[in-house]
Image (cartoon, rainbow, N blue to C red):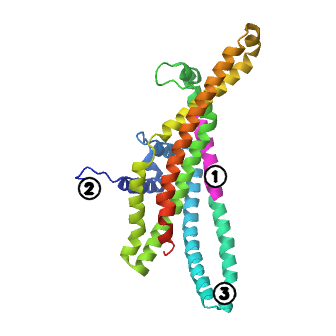
Amino acid sequence: LQRAGVRLKVLDVLHYTVSLAADLAVPSRMKGEKRNAVRALLGMLLNDARHGATSRRYVAAMVLLGVLRTALMHRSTTLAFKFSDAVHHKNYRKFFALLPEAALVALTGSAITNAASYARDALALHWRQALGERMHQLYFDSMRYYHVANVAGKGKVVDADTRLTREVYSVTKRLSIIVSLLARAVPHISWFTLLLWRRRGLRLALFPHIYLGAAYEIAQRLFPKDMGDRFRRLSAASSGYTRSATRLRTHGESVAALGGDQVEEALLDDSLKGVQRAQRAVSNGQSHFGFIFKLLYIYGSRSWTASF
């Protein structure tokens, strides 16, 4: 395939996942990273002199909780088979004997799931503080708060206030979700693949991975490629709409005195239309994405995954 000019994207995902796991295990590997934005941010947050130690403890806790969830899922799956067997053979004594263990698994599972969610959200908040403090430092350095909005060319940022107050938490939350998913997925995949290999053979153990790899290759070629640009245009349009409304409120007396109602209304209407166009583009892209995702990853595999 490589000789034919077909690049398998799933190999990039495997390489990225392995590299990210190694980076989280040894955060010093990410020091000085500049090419990859995610690695650069993680490297800064995990190696920060003030916040790095706490960040690493949260990551270690999420890994431990991921291992515990894997063990609990294994036990839960075993219990499900026992319950099914008891119901099939009408063995009521066995059925009721399993209920205390099922209640214990449910209680433990709820506690571990809640702890994992808490660790993920706490890490996002901790990283928001660390990244926010760093951005404040850079924002006020050399009067960047002034120059960033007035510089000519592509370096101009007209919505720095929005990015600083809203997007920082959005970024740190997504980073914590990445770490949480990795901490949860690696133990799950490793253990259940090994278990399926031992019980059903190598071919059946590899089949889910082959299907998901093929689905990923197809999905990545069909997914809309400009969703990031669409969201950026929506953010810029929303900021412009807010600025138009704020300007009218701030200079309302002057507008009223000079009879500028119609001009301001036209500007506000144009800003709203820009928001609507950007929002419609985002909604269309999300609908396109959702259809492909559900077809390949949810409904396309639901019929046969139940047998595993």
What residue is drawn where x is 51% and y is 19%?
A: 151
What residue is drawn where x is 68% and y is 92%?
A: 93
Q: Secondary structure at mark 2?
A: loop
Separation (CA) of disc 1 from disc 2:
42 Å
Quadrant assignment for the N terminus: bottom left
Residue located beneath label 1 in the image: 121
User: Residue 129 location in percent, x, y?
Assistant: 63, 42
Task: Specify which label sits upstream in the sequence, 3 or 2.
Answer: 2
Separation (CA) of disc 3 from disc 1:
38 Å
Q: Are marks 3 and 1 in contact (CB under 8 Å)?
A: no
Q: Main secondary structure of the magenta part?
A: helix
- Say if 21 sits above or below 39 in the image: below
- Say if 131 sits above or below 303 in the image: above
Q: Amino acid at mark 3?
A: Phe
The boundaries of the magenta stretch are: 117-137
Count of numbered circles on the image:
3
- Can residue 52 be spotted in the picture? no
